[in-house]
Image (cartoon, helix red, strand yellow):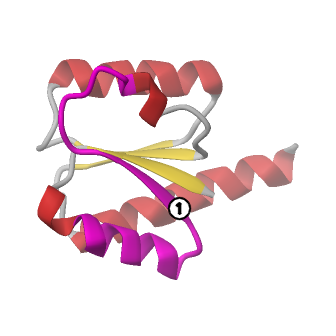
């Protein structure tokens, strides 16, 4: 499963990758304002938004995009590793629940 992280801190990128690898996931990290915003959201199975690190506009654009493609979204105010792990668990719960229903 590939998870896109919006927000977050560059200095924690390695720790984010390690936390996702523990669960067997790949990561796309968007920690700065990029022109190819939607490229970071394409071909992902879940989106995690660290709300204290991104603009409201970026957050709402990501949520709107996720709704159109039925991608699960988890929001966390904290960009810490424990906040990431909680968000990963939320994404997994929603993702695997949807797979069981289909």
Q: Residue at the spot x=43%, y=35% of the render?
A: 40
Residue that carries the numbered disc 1 in the rendered image: 26
Residue 26 falls left or right of residue 32: right
- At a point 15% along the width and 56% down the height, the residue shown is 9
Per the rendered image, the range of residues in magenta is 13-37
Q: Quadrant of residue 38?
A: top left
Depth order, front residue of 99/42:
42
The N terminus appears in which quarter of the rendering? bottom right
Residue drawn at (46%, 70%) of the image: 20
Residue 54, given in percent of the width and then of the height, sits at 16, 35
Answer few, some or many: residues within 10 Å of disc 1's Cα (few below 14, many 20 plus, some between 14 and 19). some
Q: Spot the residue most to the bottom.
A: 22
Q: Is residue 99 left or right of residue 92?
A: right
Give coordinates of residue 2: x percent, y percent.
57, 53
Q: Is residue 55 magenta?
A: no
Percent across and percent down for residue 33 are 19, 29
Residue found 21% across the figure and 44% down from its top: 31
35 relative position to 25: left or right: left
Q: How many marks?
A: 1
């Amino acid at each position: 499963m590939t998870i896109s992280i919006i927000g977050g801190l560059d200095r924690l990128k390695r720790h984010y990758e390690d936390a996702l690898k523990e669960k067997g996931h790949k990561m796309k990290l968007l920690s700065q304002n990029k022109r190819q915003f939607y490229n970071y959201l394409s071909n992902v199975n879940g989106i995690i938004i660290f709300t204290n690190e991104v603009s409201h506009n970026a957050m709402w654009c990501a949520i709107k995009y996720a709704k159109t493609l039925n991608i699960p979204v988890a929001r966390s105010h904290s960009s810490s590793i424990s906040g990431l792990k909680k968000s990963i668990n939320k994404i997994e719960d929603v993702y695997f629940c949807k797979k069981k229903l289909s």
